[in-house]
Image (tube, rainbow, N blue to C red):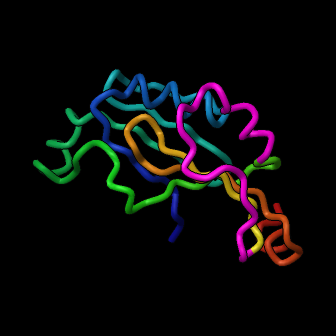
Amino acid sequence: MDFVSIRIITGDVARLVDFYERATGVEAKRYSEDFAELRTASATLAIGSTRTVPFLASGAARPAGDQRVIIEFLVDDVDGVYRKLSGFVEEFVQEPTTMPWGNRSLLLPDPDGNLVNFFTPVSPAAIEKFAR
């Protein structure tokens, strides 16, 4: 089994796609006004409209974050991402901080309130764990 994607349900696909394109530098493929995907080498972030939920099962998913899930992106320079997003992102939950497990992390909400973590491994063990 391979983990290949996570999907966010939103009331505004265009706004969320624009945010993730700008935050990650990854261009989304827009399949329709109701569905888009940002593909990386290891996984895909899918963004679907609330109008797509009935295709899954009525009421199966709701838009807007409830802060139970954190979407994480491994980046080469988390401090550089922070500098790039300062002025674009209105609020940071946590500025770049080195965690006890060896990652330097930046935590922020996306426009729907979903938590997003950009991180760079900095300890020898974390660097080895995430070696590409």
Residue 43 seen from this side? no
Q: Quadrant of residue 30?
A: top left
Residue 112 position in % (x across, y down):
37, 38
Q: Quadrant of the C terminus?
A: bottom right
Closest to the observer: 81 or 52? 81
Residue 62 seen from this side? yes
Residue 3 position in % (x across, y down):
51, 63
Q: Is residue 71 left or right of residue 32?
A: right
What residue is at 77 percent from the left and 57 percent from the top? 120
What residue is at 64 percent from the left and 33 percent from the top? 26
What residue is at 64 percent from the left and 45 percent from the top? 40
Residue 56 position in % (x across, y down):
20, 49
What residue is at 76 percent from the left and 35 percent from the top? 83
Closest to the observer: 6 or 88? 88
Q: From this view, report whether residue 66 is shown above or below residue 33.
A: below
In magenta, the rendered stretch is 79-101
Q: From this view, report whether residue 5 is shown above or below residue 47.
A: below
Asked whether 99 falls inside the magenta stretch, the response is: yes
Q: Is residue 111 left or right of residue 91?
A: left
Q: Is residue 83 left or right of residue 48?
A: right
Q: From this view, report whether residue 98 is shown above or below residue 91.
A: below
Instruction: Give the number of marks.
Output: 0
Asked whether 82 falls inside the magenta stretch, the response is: yes
Residue 103 position in % (x across, y down):
74, 65
